Each structure stands twice: as structure tokens, then as C-alpha cells.
Amino acid sequence: MKSNARIIIAGGGTGGHIFPAIAIANAIKSMAPGTEFLFIGARGKMEMEKVPQAGYTIEGLEIAGFNRSSLIKNIGLPLKLIKSFFQVRTIFKRFRPDAVIGVGGYSSFPVLRFAQSQNVKTFIHESNSFAGKSNILLGKRATGIFVSAEGMEKFFPADKIMVTGNPVRQAIAENDVTKEKALQYFGLSAGKKVVLSIGGSLGAKSINEAIAAGLEEFSKNGLQLIWQTGKPYHEKAIALVKGKAGIYASDFISQMEMAYAAADFVISRSGAMAIAELCVVKKPVLFVPYPFAAEDHQTANAKTLVNKHAAEMITDGEALNQLVPAIIALSKDEQRQEEYISNIATLAITNADTTIAHTILESLN
């Protein structure tokens, strides 16, 4: 096992890409403390803030993804892609990586494509049950591909696939925060149950609007609320909750282990990483899948848990009228809560990061 490897980790855009990347880096570092890391992301995206907070160096590419809603905004894309390849080449000359790990997001494509052209070992982590187009292209020449579930042979060469599950942040996988401490952290009372609403790292419009419309119902039903709004809705949410007791609102919760420890019930999108974390923390969940995810995979993700009696789901379109009544009904049904907790716990995977780390380090011998 190589003790002083130099590894680039590329990708980002959302917490669902960034936090697994950091979890993999942390696992590699614990096994091989001499490893040097360089993260590569997209300038202006959240990885440029979150990766340094985790103690790692990151460089940003001037790159953007394909804009499906406005074709005119894609005019500059070819130029940005070419420019990013030159940036990547300069970074590689300087850093000389032994391996490159791609975690998804459009910044991973030029990095892994260039690495493959230089015969540098490349690894892909595909968190979703439907692989992205970039990862499918990169998978043909990848050294290894780590996936969350069975059945990914339709996207990748079967002999390169390893089913590992999705890496969960160590602070969440090994959460030892007490409920009392967590409630104090959010300024909430010990005597009332808590709903945690997380619309993904960038927020969720339908969830936010539903929470806003039903805000008074939480206190009427003896519930407190931790509300992660995302940046676009933050100012409006802060104005709505001003002066209201039992509500904590923030655009982003950096210490999610605190939020999970405080929560009795969770409202969430059903991205792969959100599901991985919720299985580990064993909470009754009401999923509101993001309807525009590729191949509608968030709905497929949520239905998998619903079919196993491990969670509930309402559609994005139903959220405004049904979300708050549904979570209040769940809060009053202890039998359903116990069933969901028991069943979601059986789906938890806590060692994906160490499995991936071990496999990558072994390949570098």
C-alpha cells in the first residue's frame, strides 16, 4: 500500500458530490497519512468553500455545465471546456498525481479525461442509480468504478464495477452528539419534538414554499422546526420566522450531525447521498423527490424505500398542500414512526469510504 501517494479528487457542484469526496479523502488519509491531496472543482461553486473548510487545498476551473433551460447560455461552453483542459494540463505538470478520483459534477470530466490520456489511474464514484453521461464516457477507460447499488452494468464495464454504497461523512456515521446538546445548539426546547427540513445543499423551492405556507401549523401541533433553506430562499425565510419561538432557519447547516441528533422527523429530497445519511441516522423520513433529476432517479430512489416500508413520499407538485399536514400526521403516529426507523436502519452502510480508500491505495502498489 503506497504511503506517500499524490491524489487529485475532481468534481462538486452540490453537497451530494462534495461530502463523499471529503469522506473518501479522510479515509485514505487515515490509512496512509503521507498522502497528498489536491481537489479540483468549478470556480464559484460550493466546493470552493466547503473543501478548504475540511482542511484540503482546491483549485477551481473556469468551466460550466450545459444549461438545459436556456440554450443561448451554452454559446461559451466549448471555449470554457478547451480552457479548462489547458488549466488541467498545467495542474498535472505541477502536482504529478498517481491517481485521480472523480465524484461527479461537470468539473470532473476534463480532469479525468486528461488523466486517462496520460495513463494516470482514474477512479469514479457514481452515487446515483442512473449514471451521468460524463461518467459513462469516462467509465470505459477508468481503473475502477465504485457504485451505490447493483445493476450498474448497463452504464459501465462489469469487470470494473465495485458495489460499495455511498460514503457518509464521518461526523454523521460516528455521531455521538446527545439530543440535549443538539437542541441547545439550535436554541430549541427539550420538551417538544423536532422536524428537520433539508431541501439539499442548494435548497428546494417546493419544500420551502410548503414550509412557509404552513409555518403556523408546527407550533399549533407542538412541533419545533430546523429549516435549511438554501441561499435563494434564506432572506425570505429569516423574515418569516422572526420573533417566532421553536424555529431555527439557516441557508446551510454545516454541522449536520447536530441537526440529525436534534431531529425526530425529517423532510428531505431523495438524492443518493441524502438517502445514505438518513439510513445511517435512522429517522422517520418524508421524501419530496426533485422531479427534474436525470431519469427522475430521485423518485426511483424514494420509491425503493417506500416499497420497503422505510419512508414516506409525496410528489413535488403535491408538496404545497400536502407536505406540512403529512409530516404532522406522521408526528402523531408512533407505530408508523417505529416501523420506518426499524426498516430504514437495515439499509445503512457505514464503511463505503474505507472500502473505496483501501481499494484505491491497494491499486497504487
Image (cartoon, helix red, strand yellow):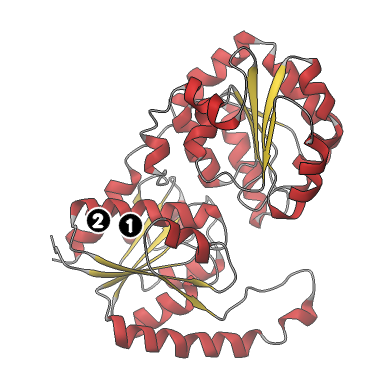
Can you name the residue that lies furthest to the front here? 243
Q: Quadrant of residue 348?
A: top left
Looking at the picture, which amino acid does disc 2 mark? Lys
At a point 61% along the width and 48% down the height, the residue shown is 252
Rendered-image quadrant of the N terminus:
bottom left
Q: CB of mark 1 within 8 Å of CB of mark 2?
A: yes
Residue 220 position (above or below residue 28): above
Count residues near mark 2 (Cα–Cα under 10 Å), then give few for <14, some for 14-19, many for 20+.
Answer: some
Name the residue that disc number 1 marks.
25
Res. 319 in view: no
At a point 60% along the width and 28% down the height, the residue shown is 307
Res. 302 in view: yes
At a point 19% along the width and 52% down the height, the residue shown is 31
Q: Residue 23 at what x, y percent from top left?
A: 37, 51
Residue 182 position (above or below residue 315): above
Front position in the image: 297 or 75:
75
The tag on residue 318 is none
On screen, residue 285 versus residue 174, left or right, reads right
Circle 1: element type: helix
Count residues near mark 1 (Cα–Cα under 10 Å), then give few for <14, some for 14-19, many for 20+.
Answer: many
Q: Residue 6 at what x, y percent from top left?
A: 25, 71
Name the residue that disc number 2 marks.
29
Looking at the picture, which amino acid does disc 1 mark? Ala
Q: Residue 153 at what x, y percent from top left?
A: 43, 56
Residue 184 position (above or below residue 317): above
The span from disc 1 to disc 2 (Cα, nearest Å) is: 6 Å
Circle 2: element type: helix
